[in-house]
Amino acid sequence: MDIRNTLNEMLVRLFRSVNVIEERAIRTGEYKDVTANDMHVMEAIGMDGMKNMTRVARSLEVTTGTLTIAVNSLVRKGYVDRVRSEEDRRVVLISLSDKGKRAYLHHSRFHERMISAVVEELTDEEQQVLGKALTKLDQFFMTTAHQTMF
Protein backbone atom coordinates (compact mmCIF):
# COMPACT_ATOMS: atom_id res chain seq x y z
CA MET A 1 0.00 0.00 0.00
CA ASP A 2 1.40 3.41 -0.84
CA ILE A 3 1.78 6.26 1.65
CA ARG A 4 -1.15 8.25 0.23
CA ASN A 5 -3.61 5.41 0.77
CA THR A 6 -2.16 4.72 4.20
CA LEU A 7 -2.46 8.38 5.22
CA ASN A 8 -6.01 8.60 3.89
CA GLU A 9 -7.10 5.50 5.79
CA MET A 10 -5.33 6.58 8.97
CA LEU A 11 -6.72 10.11 8.96
CA VAL A 12 -10.29 8.91 8.39
CA ARG A 13 -9.93 6.21 11.06
CA LEU A 14 -8.29 8.57 13.56
CA PHE A 15 -10.97 11.21 13.07
CA ARG A 16 -13.75 8.69 13.66
CA SER A 17 -11.99 7.02 16.58
CA VAL A 18 -11.25 10.26 18.40
CA ASN A 19 -14.87 11.37 17.98
CA VAL A 20 -16.24 8.08 19.32
CA ILE A 21 -13.77 7.83 22.21
CA GLU A 22 -14.22 11.48 23.14
CA GLU A 23 -18.01 11.14 23.17
CA ARG A 24 -17.77 8.06 25.44
CA ALA A 25 -15.26 9.74 27.74
CA ILE A 26 -17.44 12.85 28.11
CA ARG A 27 -20.73 11.03 28.72
CA THR A 28 -19.98 9.55 32.12
CA GLY A 29 -21.65 9.96 35.49
CA GLU A 30 -22.81 13.52 35.99
CA TYR A 31 -22.24 14.39 32.31
CA LYS A 32 -24.50 11.87 30.53
CA ASP A 33 -26.36 14.75 28.88
CA VAL A 34 -23.27 16.36 27.30
CA THR A 35 -22.45 15.82 23.64
CA ALA A 36 -19.06 16.34 21.99
CA ASN A 37 -20.53 19.44 20.33
CA ASP A 38 -21.64 20.75 23.74
CA MET A 39 -18.12 20.21 25.02
CA HIS A 40 -16.57 22.08 22.11
CA VAL A 41 -18.83 25.04 22.86
CA MET A 42 -17.84 24.91 26.54
CA GLU A 43 -14.17 24.78 25.54
CA ALA A 44 -14.65 27.89 23.39
CA ILE A 45 -16.33 29.69 26.29
CA GLY A 46 -13.46 28.66 28.53
CA MET A 47 -12.79 29.05 32.21
CA ASP A 48 -11.75 32.71 32.25
CA GLY A 49 -15.06 34.48 32.82
CA MET A 50 -17.65 36.12 30.61
CA LYS A 51 -17.32 36.21 26.83
CA ASN A 52 -19.67 37.72 24.32
CA MET A 53 -21.56 35.46 21.95
CA THR A 54 -20.02 36.96 18.81
CA ARG A 55 -16.48 36.24 20.00
CA VAL A 56 -17.32 32.64 20.88
CA ALA A 57 -19.17 32.10 17.58
CA ARG A 58 -16.14 33.40 15.66
CA SER A 59 -13.78 31.10 17.53
CA LEU A 60 -16.01 28.14 16.64
CA GLU A 61 -16.46 29.41 13.09
CA VAL A 62 -20.25 29.26 13.35
CA THR A 63 -22.96 31.90 13.11
CA THR A 64 -24.25 33.60 16.23
CA GLY A 65 -27.61 31.95 15.51
CA THR A 66 -26.06 28.49 15.51
CA LEU A 67 -24.25 29.26 18.75
CA THR A 68 -27.48 30.55 20.29
CA ILE A 69 -29.13 27.17 19.73
CA ALA A 70 -26.22 25.36 21.40
CA VAL A 71 -26.07 27.85 24.28
CA ASN A 72 -29.84 27.59 24.87
CA SER A 73 -29.40 23.85 25.33
CA LEU A 74 -26.39 24.29 27.63
CA VAL A 75 -28.26 26.86 29.73
CA ARG A 76 -31.21 24.44 30.08
CA LYS A 77 -28.80 21.66 31.13
CA GLY A 78 -27.14 23.95 33.67
CA TYR A 79 -23.66 24.15 32.10
CA VAL A 80 -23.70 27.77 30.92
CA ASP A 81 -24.86 31.04 32.44
CA ARG A 82 -26.08 33.86 30.19
CA VAL A 83 -26.59 37.55 30.97
CA ARG A 84 -26.99 40.79 29.05
CA SER A 85 -24.19 43.34 29.20
CA GLU A 86 -24.85 46.26 31.53
CA GLU A 87 -23.09 48.63 29.10
CA ASP A 88 -24.93 47.48 25.97
CA ARG A 89 -28.11 45.44 26.45
CA ARG A 90 -27.81 44.07 22.90
CA VAL A 91 -24.65 42.19 23.89
CA VAL A 92 -25.16 38.73 25.41
CA LEU A 93 -22.41 37.45 27.69
CA ILE A 94 -21.92 33.78 28.47
CA SER A 95 -19.78 31.89 30.96
CA LEU A 96 -19.51 28.40 32.34
CA SER A 97 -21.56 27.66 35.44
CA ASP A 98 -19.96 25.65 38.26
CA LYS A 99 -21.35 22.50 36.63
CA GLY A 100 -19.92 23.64 33.28
CA LYS A 101 -16.50 24.21 34.84
CA ARG A 102 -16.54 20.70 36.31
CA ALA A 103 -17.46 19.27 32.88
CA TYR A 104 -14.68 21.33 31.27
CA LEU A 105 -12.11 19.93 33.73
CA HIS A 106 -13.48 16.40 33.24
CA HIS A 107 -12.94 16.78 29.50
CA SER A 108 -9.47 18.29 29.99
CA ARG A 109 -8.44 15.24 32.02
CA PHE A 110 -9.54 13.01 29.12
CA HIS A 111 -7.29 14.97 26.75
CA GLU A 112 -4.38 14.80 29.19
CA ARG A 113 -4.75 11.00 29.49
CA MET A 114 -5.03 10.62 25.71
CA ILE A 115 -1.88 12.66 25.03
CA SER A 116 0.07 10.93 27.80
CA ALA A 117 -0.86 7.52 26.38
CA VAL A 118 0.40 8.53 22.93
CA VAL A 119 3.57 10.26 24.07
CA GLU A 120 4.73 7.54 26.47
CA GLU A 121 4.96 5.08 23.58
CA LEU A 122 7.24 7.34 21.51
CA THR A 123 10.93 8.16 21.70
CA ASP A 124 11.95 11.82 21.93
CA GLU A 125 12.81 11.76 18.23
CA GLU A 126 9.46 10.24 17.30
CA GLN A 127 7.68 12.87 19.41
CA GLN A 128 9.49 15.62 17.49
CA VAL A 129 8.64 14.08 14.11
CA LEU A 130 4.99 13.58 15.10
CA GLY A 131 4.81 17.17 16.35
CA LYS A 132 6.20 18.54 13.07
CA ALA A 133 3.94 16.34 10.94
CA LEU A 134 0.81 17.29 12.90
CA THR A 135 1.75 20.97 12.77
CA LYS A 136 2.00 20.76 8.97
CA LEU A 137 -1.29 18.89 8.80
CA ASP A 138 -2.94 21.52 10.99
CA GLN A 139 -1.55 24.31 8.80
CA PHE A 140 -3.00 22.58 5.74
CA PHE A 141 -6.44 22.31 7.34
CA MET A 142 -6.35 25.90 8.60
CA THR A 143 -5.32 27.19 5.17
CA THR A 144 -7.95 25.20 3.28
CA ALA A 145 -10.76 25.45 5.84
CA HIS A 146 -12.38 28.32 3.96
CA GLN A 147 -11.42 27.25 0.47
CA THR A 148 -12.64 24.50 -1.78
CA MET A 149 -10.04 22.00 -2.86
CA PHE A 150 -11.30 21.58 -6.40
Image (tube, rainbow, N blue to C red):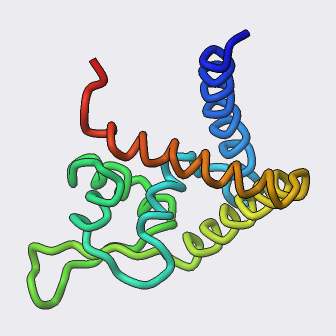
Report the front residue among 97 and 130: 130
Report the label total: 0
Residue at the extreme top of the image, as rendered? 1
Name the quarter where the C terminus is drawn.
Answer: top left
> As drawn, is 119 to the left or to the right of 45?
right
Quick check: 21 above or below 70?
Answer: above
Q: Is residue 14 above or below residue 142?
A: above
- Residue drawn at (50%, 79%) of the image: 47
Does residue 56 appear left or right of residue 111 in this picture?
left
Q: Residue at x 61, y 45 (%)?
A: 133
From the viewer's perspective, tell me whether residue 7 is left or right of residue 121.
Answer: left
x and y percentages locating residue 89 in the rendered image: 10, 79
In depth, the one of 142 and 95 nearer the eye is 142
Instruction: Tell me which corner region of the image, top left, top right, bottom left or bottom right, holds residue 54.
Output: bottom left
Residue 131 location (% of width, % of height):
65, 54
Q: Residue at x 56, y 46 (%)?
A: 35
In this view of the protein, which residue sits in the foreground, 36 or 137?
A: 137
Farthest residue toward the front? 125
Residue 88 as seen in the image, left or right of residue 73: left
Question: In this view of the protein, which residue sits in the foreground, 64 or 138?
Answer: 138
- Residue at horizontal 52%, vertical 42%? 137
Image quadrant occupied by the N terminus: top right
Query: Residue 16: x and y, percent?
Result: 64, 29
Q: Quadrant of residue 3?
A: top right
Q: Position of residue 19 (x, y in %)?
A: 63, 38
